Image (cartoon, rainbow, N blue to C red):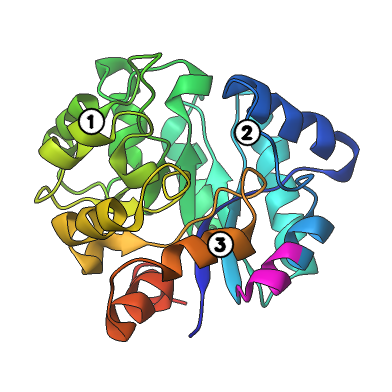
Amino acid sequence: MRIFDVHVHIYPDKIAEKASESIGAFYDGIRMHGNGTLTDCLRQMDEGGVERFAAHSVALTPHNVESINRFILEAQRQAPERLVPFAAIHPDMPDMQATVDGIVEQGFRGVKIHPDMQKFRVDDPQVAPMMEALSGRLPLLIHCGDYRYDFDGPRRILNLRRNFPRLQIICAHFGGWGEWDSAMELLPGNDLIVDTSSSLYRWDAGRATEAVHRFGVENVLFGTDYPMWSPREELQRFMQLGLTDREREDILWNNAARLLKL
């Protein structure tokens, strides 16, 4: 089966190890399974049989946006047949429309935000210009859920969907890391896409299979959250789900190919 990984983080070599460690620290000491460099990422994707992947990073300030996006595009030039670039963005960009126009013109296929780290609520009126500028332009991959914060939980994602019906939303972590029960209750049936990242390590196969069917196979993308997890091990977890071969093919490749025009 062809495999596309929609959720991959990479960093410049000189800061990759420190950046990866900071993610582990943010999540109470979760052990990283990679160092976050493009070289290590490609090696692990090869080990896991991943053909292509969406790579991104998070802009903690508006000042970081340009340099991160420049790095992602350079990485894409180094691995043009493998890496699909997702842009960083920050809600405090001074000219949001020009920022989004530039992201589209540079060839990014999507945008990634992490509201817990960036410290904004996804349904706050102050971030509406960013959501409006992205609506109808590019898919927006959102880190969703964290029982410790109140920035992007399932209820706020539902508000965002209602406020911006044209926004194409990919909800990471089955819609709510650490808030999966609430996500499963509130989010299915609301024209949302979810990814499998940073969830399968916590679930048994039965619960994960139920989540896939609740959201609808056509709305689920495979994601590993590298370097948090090993692509090979995440694929092994995924293959334990009670899915048909056709369902696996859709989640591992076909849905992403349709969404991102691979």
The quadrant where residue 75 appears: bottom right
The quadrant where residue 74 appears: bottom right
Q: Residue 65 carries which label?
A: 2
SS at badge 2: helix
Q: Do the residues labelled 3 and 1 touch (CB within 8 Å)?
A: no
Q: Which of 89 and 189 is in front in this view?
A: 189
* Residue 59 in sight: yes
Q: Which mark is residue 216?
A: none
Give how far across and how far down residue 123 sits, in percent. 25, 23
Q: Residue 154 carries which label?
A: 1
Q: Do the residues labelled 2 and 1 touch (CB within 8 Å)?
A: no
Give how far across and how far down residue 153 sits, in percent. 28, 26
Disc 2 from disc 3: Cα separation: 15 Å
Discs 3/1, front: 1
Disc 2 from disc 1: Cα separation: 26 Å
Q: Residue furthest right?
A: 14
Residue 114 in magenta stretch? no
> For the residue carrying disc 1, how many other residues have a C-alpha within 10 Å: few (<14), some (14-19), or many (20+)?
many
Discs 2/1, front: 1
What residue sits 56% from the left and 62% below the top? Answer: 107
* N-terminal-most mark, 3 or 1: 3
Magenta-highlighted residues: 44-50
* N-terminal-most mark, 2 or 3: 2
Q: Which amino acid does label 2 sit on?
A: Val
Q: In this view, does 73 lie above or below 156?
A: below
Give how far across and how far down residue 220 sits, in percent. 30, 61
Q: To which residue does mark 3 refer?
A: 107
Give how far across and how far down residue 179 sits, in percent. 29, 29
